[in-house]
Image (tube, coloured by chain):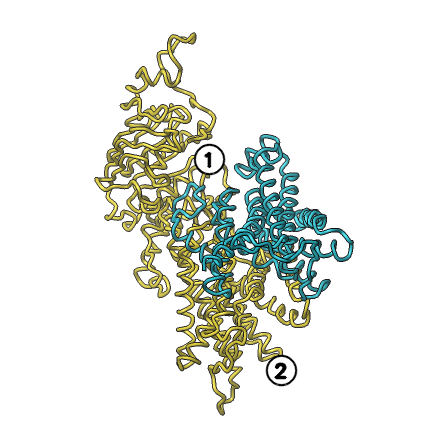
Amino acid sequence: MLELALEQIVNGLLVGVIYTMMALGLMVILGILNVINMAQGEFYMLGGYMSFVATALLGLDYLSSIAFAMLAAAAVGILVERVAVRPFLARPPYVAFLSTLAVSMILSDGAQLIFTPDPQNIATPFPLNPIVIGPIDLTVQNIVIFLIASTIVATFAAFLKYTRLGMAVRALAKDHDVALLMGIDADRIHTLTFAIGAALAGAAGALVGAMFGVYPSMGELPLLKGFSLVIMGGLGSVGGVLAAGLTLGVAEGLTAGFISSDLTNLVAFVLLIAVLLLRPQGLSGRRLSRG
Amino acid sequence: MDRRSAALLALLAALPLFSGSDYVQSVIVTAVLFAFVTTGMNLIFGYAGQHAFGHPVFFGVGAYASALLATRAGMPVAAAIPLGAAAAAAISFCIAVPCLRLRGLYFGMATFAFAYIIYILAQSWVALTRGPMGIPAVPPLFAPTGASLSPDERFYLLLVAVLAATVFLLDRLLHSPTGRAWIAIRENEDLAASIGVRRFLYAAAAFVAGAFVSALGGALFVHYEGFIDPTAVGFQTIVTAMIMMIAGGTGSLAGPILGAVVFGVLSELLQIAGEARNLVLGGVLLAAVAFLPEGLVGIWRRLRPAPQSLPSSPAADESLPEAYFDPRRPILSLEIRDLAKSFAGLRALEGVSFTVEPGEIVAVIGPNGAGKTTLFNLVTGFLEPSAGTVRLGGAELAGLLPAAVAARGIARTFQVTSLFSGLSVEENLRTATHLWSLRNPLDALLRSRRFRAREGEIERAVEAILSLTELSAHRHTAARALSYGDQRRLELAIAIATGSRHLLLDEPAAGLNPAESNRLRNLLRGLKGLGFTITLIEHDMKLVMELCDRVVVLNYGRKIAEGTPAETARHPEVIEAYLGREEEDAPAPQEPFPASTAFFAEKEPDA
């Protein structure tokens, strides 16, 4: 009983860090461009496939393939920003939602046509036999993936907090107009934001792909869960999203272990409803209006 | 009903006459069914302006509900359809309540997440929905009889008739206080609250009414198709409906129907596209948002000439109608006691007390950042006080939401011009009469005698206020196209139209030239004569001196003086606040407020 719980908690933390990567990408794009990037799930899927292509066809090792996946996702992110986001930024905010949704549909069907709907596996050099630490079985692969994911999240947080560019990004998220007056080049930051957001998703896809395989629709659920985390995490705080992400991962693990694995995908939304109902101000208390 | 919708519906009714094949007929039926979804979603998305991306899911919810009622509960189909739609509407209410705590895109994301929950439930609650296998053998509405019309033909005519009735009723609702309130929250949420529109109530109403219309379509669909599976609540159904609505054009009744009919062929195209279905759908969506910004009806709108502004007809009676003077909102004194507000440790306002008696004009003045706008926000419910009370005739206002404060009889304007900028001047005023209009939707749907009478009084009031504020000539001009001075007068006119006779005006003269400023002074004097009580924040000292009965001076969040304009002008602390200490090198003049100039030209970026 306890062993199962511990096992599920550890697995949940691993999954949670990866959800956090998804949510942080969405959050930074939402915060700066006021765009819900519906193509984020496809950046994730793309990361998975690029890692697969790099290892299976280009002969790269798995670790380099993650970097390759991030770069490829970032490149596609920049392209999407130019083609499907920037032309619509002056229109009402739902327009970019629809245009990125369109991109998402095109990318996922494109992947299906190229790679077929069947799952592909990413080969990793890590032994799959478990290491037993007390009551918990861990694979080397999972440990490595956890460490990589944590490093990426920490690097992202440090970038936002400590670099000049990160400061410009935060300034733009805080007050778009004033930031422009301070001489921040919004177009450049928008491009950068999409590149970073896509790279985060791409890395997440490459990491998850190594564990569970890659397939064209793999990004759908992480996208929706990422949304829920952005709302739950308090709209704009890295720490909040991380806390929400880890909570979600653990809650899903425990649900799968003790209730039913059919229900794991509902956990995110149940948590979301709970947060919405228990925090009456909504979590967006930034507006003047209380109407 | 407007001409476009009527023409469209007549066309739809006649369509099957020209089509021989069953295939073409089924394409047309599907298109008309989608018209219910797009019409329903348009209420919350196009009219109330809330981005409910997941809303089309209620089509499938209605379909499931009606199918279950007919197959499991053995209910007659004719009863299962409306009941199924009602059940879906009830579910939509449960979803609207948590989602509406969020705003803008976050609200949209939450509705999308809920649509996904419904999809998962349809897939995995096998005991109820039979999961991916779906529910087969759903009974049809019409059994074959010997009559001349086939069941499909009868079904189609019923479908068009129900759609026509829906559009007819919605048209009545939209031209009533309910529809005006929806558009108000779309156009300007803060201003809507200040004229007494409760966002939550009206947004939820649009969400649920829209879900009912959508679900009605779904319920009709399931008895036509005879089968339902989770794709009805799936992603492609939602996106198809969204494309149809956007491409047709939101915010008009005809647009979404036109979109459903024109893009109804989409679902057929998708059959052909097979594997690349989403690729095609995505491409069409991208093209629609890029090339049809106002939708198909936008093309129609562009071809039609804009209405001419007619010279104002000399109205027989330009006095305000009786209904305007709501006896439930008598003019009472406004008492502010020890009011305080801190923002994360910063004390914006501290222990401010004063009273505004009925019929007075009181000015609140003070240097930039003194807390004047904060004071207004506290009184009108846009901010919650940290301490202190605000009473109107003894009843506590502090802690009420802005719309509730407005309902007690206080109207406000904003420092930065705030209008329903997409609406005409006339529409702005009509919308602002919300609080004293007859809001019961049943009266609007039936066009009851008392409803018509009240709407007539609203028209008279709009006329009277237009002429009072000298805006009659611009009645058909969009608010955003007015000159700055006219916009500021329109703001005041909106406040007057609410029926509140306690007005809080935030820098009404800011940015006005001397002629406009004079006009404003005369207008405010006129309002005083009509029995209005006015509190205003103002930097134009000439206006304050000439107009106000009393002046309250704030500095650094505290009240430093109160009295007649002449008294406060001589008050040493006031002189110090505006001009600095006497010891400093500039000699203090006798009179701190030069009689002829606006003291502060620039706007105040308030706390």
Chain for disc number 1: B
Q: Mark 1 points at which residue?
A: B485
Residue drawn where x is 43% and y is 42% of the image: B471
In which quadrant of the rendered image does the C terminus of chain B lie? top left
Q: Residue at x 71, y 50 (%)?
A: A65
CA separation, marks 2 and 1?
Answer: 62 Å
The answer to which quarter of the image holds residue B527 is top left
User: Is B512 left or right of A124, judged from the image as shown?
Assistant: left
| Amino acid type, mark 1 | Gly
Height in image: A59 above or below B225? above
- Which one of the lettered chains is coloured cyan? A
Query: Dot 2 corresponds to which residue?
Result: B20
Q: Residue B41 placed where, x, y %?
A: 49, 61
Left or right, A201 with respect to B458, comes to: right
Identify which residue, A60 or B192, lies in the foreground.
A60
Observer able to see residue B135: yes
Q: Do the residues labelled 2 and 1 touch (CB within 8 Å)?
A: no
- Mark 2 on the same chain as mark 1: yes
Residue placed most toward the observer, B451 or B235: B235
Could you say where residue A242 lies in the image, as x and y percent from the top left?
52, 46
Q: In this view, does A100 lie above or below A165?
A: below
